[in-house]
Image (tube, rainbow, N blue to C red):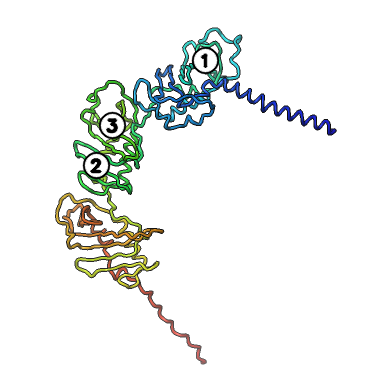
């Protein structure tokens, strides 16, 4: 091929490419935008979506709509804050399921008609043939200064698409089933089944009111440790409190009762449990008051919930009462002397009728009363102390014997780098508690003061009560020297 022909061919290719980029592609994009009826809308600019069909009729309303955008992007259909502003038009304050709502809005924004409507000459005059005489679903979208209605008819099983028309227009289209599937739901399917949504770190306090147990109040400190503050002051179990908040947060509604309802019809005028939740200032949330009832009083009967900031009464999927209203001791911390054993550097023991004992760490070794200690026995002692478990808590207020304790331990810990903060903790074992055939001998114990007394078993005391002779390093036994062999004597 000559150079001249090569140049001409190259010019034609460049011209064709320029035409595609500058003319054909923008034209195709423009035609596609025309077929995307809701391309300039999103979850903020849509004012309302009305759905009517075989599954009911209702309207989803945006309480704070904003001007429509000019971009065809679907990114902000995922804006969670904007989705929170949607609710049912006929139930003020009813939360919607954000996942279901977002799926509908995403399907609307991305909805595209086919290139051309079905040929008019091939259409039957009877709309019943296409399921459009009585549409299976109507979607009316209000936003961007106009209202657009879509009517969905039957599904064409041969092409796996559904007949649709815009309003009462004569043109019919076949479209993919995405939007119909996202919109063809009951009112309850669009509602949020979780009456309560919160994070544990937003909480300041929880109070549980029960006619049987009275009021139990829990408060969380700046280190995210829960404490019982009513009816007693005690350390709360982090696990038990996590279980409690999860139980409250996991409540799910199966039925929503709306309108002018009487609480007495659902036993909510004399509730079994009331819960008050107070949030930290940073959460910017109002306190919540929950009331729960079980009118029939049977373990498997329905439980109803009313939340102070919700308009509805919720019939719950399962019974949360056993997980919320529990005996006080089930919320208490049973491991009150927990510590990281590798941070221990010194243990000073004092005994009522025995010499004191001191354990000091030197590098990777330990000394017991300035003598080398057996590292394995020391590790065993530290493990027993770090996992010290309460057998229960005394119910009476008496002298527990801490003035002259059976054993007192002062434990020094050094925190990790770079601060290497020194922490000092104390453990005291007092008198023996009353014996019973069921529990055996138990002893009163207290950690870091005497405000929170608990009970430990006799076996537990034996595991944490050290003796010098048991902790000393054993000398390796010497092996006897074998006799020297003598050479054979000549006969």
Q: On screen, 73 above or below 228? A: above
- Nearest to the observer: residue 350 or residue 68: 68
- Mark 3, secondary structure of its residue: loop
Residue 65 visible (yes or no): yes
Q: On screen, 452 above or below 311? A: below
- Mark 2, secondary structure of its residue: strand
Residue behind mark 2:
217
Within 10 angstroms of label 2, few (less than 14), some, or many (20 or more) residues?
A: some
Residue 448: image quadrant is bottom left
- Mark 1, secondary structure of its residue: strand
Q: Which label was assigned to residue 166? A: 1
Q: Considering only order in the chain, which callout, 1 or 3, is on the residue closer to the N terminus?
A: 1
Q: On screen, 336 above or below 183? A: below
Residue behind mark 3:
300
Q: On screen, 175 above or below 465? A: above
Q: Marks 1/2: CA distance?
A: 58 Å
Q: Marks 3/1: CA distance?
A: 49 Å
Q: Position of residue 415 (x, y in %)?
A: 36, 58
Within 10 angstroms of label 3, few (less than 14), some, or many (20 or more) residues?
A: few
């Amino acid at each position: 091929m000559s150079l001249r022909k090569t140049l001409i061919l190259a010019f034609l290719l460049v011209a064709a490419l320029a035409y595609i980029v500058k003319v054909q592609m923008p034209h195709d994009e423009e035609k596609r935008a025309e077929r995307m009826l809701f391309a300039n809308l999103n979850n903020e600019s849509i004012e309302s979506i009305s759905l009517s069909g075989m599954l009911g009729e209702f309207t989803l309303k945006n309480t704070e709509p904003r001007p429509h955008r000019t971009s065809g992007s679907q990114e902000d259909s995922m804006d969670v804050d904007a989705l929170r502003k949607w609710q049912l038009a006929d139930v003020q304050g009813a939360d919607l399921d954000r996942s279901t709502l977002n799926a509908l809005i995403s399907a609307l924004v991305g909805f595209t008609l086919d290139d051309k409507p079905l040929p008019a000459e091939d259409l039957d005059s009877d709309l019943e043939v296409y399921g459009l005489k009585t549409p299976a679903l109507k979607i009316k979208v209000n936003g961007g200064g106009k209202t657009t209605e879509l009517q969905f008819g039957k599904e064409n099983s041969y092409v796996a698409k559904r007949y649709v028309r815009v309003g009462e227009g004569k043109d019919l289209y076949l479209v993919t089933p995405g939007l119909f599937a996202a919109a063809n739901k009951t009112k309850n399917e669009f509602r949020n089944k979780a009456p309560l949504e919160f994070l544990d770190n937003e909480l300041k306090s929880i109070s549980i009111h029960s006619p049987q147990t009275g009021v139990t109040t829990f408060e969380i400190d700046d280190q995210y440790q829960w404490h019982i503050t009513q009816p007693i002051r005690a350390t709360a179990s982090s696990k038990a409190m996590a279980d409690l908040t999860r139980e409250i947060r996991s409540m799910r509604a199966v039925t929503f009762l709306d309108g002018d309802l009487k609480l007495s019809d659902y036993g909510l005028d004399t509730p079994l449990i009331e819960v008050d939740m107070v949030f930290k200032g940073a959460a910017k949330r109002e306190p919540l008051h929950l009331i729960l009832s079980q009118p029939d009083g049977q373990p498997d009967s329905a439980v109803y919930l009313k939340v102070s900031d919700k308009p509805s009464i919720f019939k719950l999927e399962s019974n949360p009462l056993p997980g919320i209203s529990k005996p006080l001791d089930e919320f208490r911390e049973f491991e009150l002397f927990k510590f990281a054993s590798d941070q221990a550097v010194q243990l000073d023991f004092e005994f009522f009728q025995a010499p004191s004992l001191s354990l000091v760490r030197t590098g990777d070794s330990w000394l017991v009363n300035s003598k080398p200690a057996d590292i394995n026995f020391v590790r065993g002692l530290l493990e027993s102390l770090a996992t010290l478990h309460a057998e229960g808590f005394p119910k009476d207020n008496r002298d527990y014997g801490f003035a002259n304790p059976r054993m007192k331990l002062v434990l020094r810990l050094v925190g990790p780098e770079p601060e290497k903060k020194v922490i000092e903790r104390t453990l005291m074992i007092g008198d023996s508690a009353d014996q019973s055939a069921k529990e055996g001998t138990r002893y009163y114990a207290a950690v870091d003061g005497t405000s929170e007394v608990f009970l430990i078993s006799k076996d537990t005391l034996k595991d944490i009560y050290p003796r010098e002779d048991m902790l000393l390093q054993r000398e390796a036994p010497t092996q006897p020297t074998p006799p020297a062999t003598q050479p054979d004597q000549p006969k």
